């Protein structure tokens, strides 16, 4: 989107700035979004793994 340019670049992507502090539709913002996305993805994966492992542990006691 940044390479394409235009008057209204990534209008919907700007909404991610509501959740990810520092994010904007710029080259710097894309790097910040990458970091935030990695952090959120890691956290969600960790929580799913924790819940799954607890359920398995409870069923095998």
Image: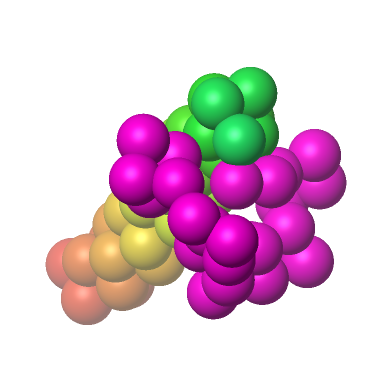
Nearer to me, 20 or 15: 15
Residue 7 picture location, percent across and down? 59, 61
Question: In the figure, is residue 7 to the left or right of 37?
Answer: right
Q: Main secondary structure of the magenta part?
A: loop
Task: Write down the quadrant of residue 29 in the picture.
Answer: top right
Nearer to us in this view, 61 or 30: 30
Residue lying at the far front of the rendered structure: 7
Q: Tell me: 59 left or right of 47.
A: left
Look at the picture and state if 13 lies above or below 33. Answer: below
Residue 6 at x, y percent in the picture: 49, 55
Can residue 39 be seen from the camera position used here? no
Visible in this render: residue 53? yes
Q: Is residue 52 above or below residue 29?
A: below
Which is more toward the observer, 24 or 35? 24
The answer to whether residue 30 is above or below residue 60 is above
Q: Looking at the image, which residue is at 73% across and 58% down? A: 17
* Residue at image point 80% right, 39% down: 22
- Residue 31, percent across and down? 54, 25
**Number of marks drawn:** 0
**Which residue range is magenta in the image?**
1-25
The residue depicted at 53 percent of the width and 34 percent of the height is 30
For the C terminus, which image quadrant? Answer: bottom left
Residue 55 placement: quadrant: bottom left
Residue 29 within the magenta-colored segment of the rendering: no
Q: Nearer the viewer, residue 46 or 50?
A: 46
As for residue 19 lying within the magenta part, the answer is yes
Q: Is residue 7 left or right of residue 53?
A: right
């Amino acid at each position: 989107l940044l390479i394409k340019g235009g008057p209204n670049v990534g209008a919907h992507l700007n909404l991610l700035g509501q959740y990810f502090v520092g994010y904007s539709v710029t080259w710097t913002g894309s790097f910040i979004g990458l970091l935030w996305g990695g952090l959120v993805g890691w956290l969600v994966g960790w929580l799913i793994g924790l819940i799954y492992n607890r359920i398995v542990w409870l069923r095998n006691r």
